[in-house]
Image: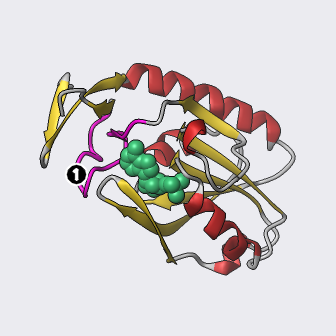
Amino acid sequence: MPKRVHLHDKAFKVFIEEKEILIKIESIAKQINEDYSHTEPLFLIVLKGAFMFGSELVSRYQGHCHLGFVNIKSYQGMKSTGNVQVSGLDPDIVKGREVIILEDIVDSGRTLYKFLPILNEMQPANVQIATLLYKPDAMKFHVPVNYSCFDIPNDFVIGFGLDYDGLGRNYRDIYQLAADS
Ligand code: IMP
Ligand code: MG
C-alpha cells in the first residue's frame, strides 16, 4: 500500500496500517461474541463508510447473527452537515432484535444522534454502537460508543471505507491529512 495518496486537491499520509486495524477488529469481534452469546444479534452496517469494517467484523463473529444495511448521509467534503438522510432500512429486520450499529467513524455524533430515534421507532430490543474510529474531542451530540477500535485525534482521515468527496474508500490502510496539504 502507498505511504502517501493524493485525492482531489489534498495529500494524505499513512496513519494506521491494515495489520493493526485487523488485530483490533478481531479483538472487538471476540468481545461482541462474548457479550452477545445469549442471542442472535442484528449487525446494522451503515453505508457507505462502514462497508469494509462491517465485512471484516461480521466475518469474524462466530455465533448466529443477522445482517442489515442502512444508508445514512451527512458529510460533504470535509464537513459534517446538519442534514442527515436515512434510507434503505427494512423495519421488519429490526423489530425485537438486539442491534449493533456498525459505523466507520463517530465524529460530531450528529449522524447517529439523528438516526437513533428513527431506529427506536422500529422497536429493537436494544441498541449498541460499534465504530472503527472515534474522535472523542469532536463529539457535540452525545451518543453512547460501546465499542471503538481506535480513538483518534480530531483530524480528517480516509481509507478502510472512509472517503474524501467520494474517493479513498478502497485503501486498506487508514490515512490522515498530511501537514503540507
Ligand atoms: P458525525 O455525524 O459528525 O459523527 O459524522 C459521522 C459521519 O461523517 C461518518 O459516518 C463519516 O461518514 C463522516 N466522517 C466523519 N469524520 C470523517 C473523516 O475524518 N473522514 C471521512 N469521513 C468522516
Ligand atoms: Mg459514514
* Secondary structure found at label 1: loop
Q: Give the residue number, with chain letter if any, for mark 1.
A: 167
Circle 1: residue type? Leu
The residue range painted magenta reads: 155-172
Q: Give the percent coordinates (x, y) of residue 5.
A: 16, 33
Residue 3 x/y as whole percent: 20, 22
Q: Is residue 123 above or below residue 125?
A: below
Q: Is residue 95 visible?
A: yes
Residue that appears at 44% across and 68% down: 73
- Identified at 58% across, 37% down, the residue is 137
From the image, which quarter does the N terminus lie in? top left
Residue at 63 percent across and 25 percent down: it is 27
Q: Is mark 1 within 8 Å of ligand 1?
A: no
| Res 111 quadrant in image | bottom right
Pinpoint residue 42: horizontal percent, then vertical percent.
Answer: 68, 58
Q: Residue at x 30, y 47 (%)?
A: 169
Above/below status of 91 relative to 125: below
- Is 178 left, or right, of 155 in this rendering? left
Q: Is residue 51 visible?
A: no
Residue 166 placement (x, y as % from top left)? 25, 57
Classify the position of the C terminus by image quarter: top left
Is residue 64 found left or right of 7 in the rendered image? right
* Whether residue 55 is situated above or below residue 67 in the rendered picture: above
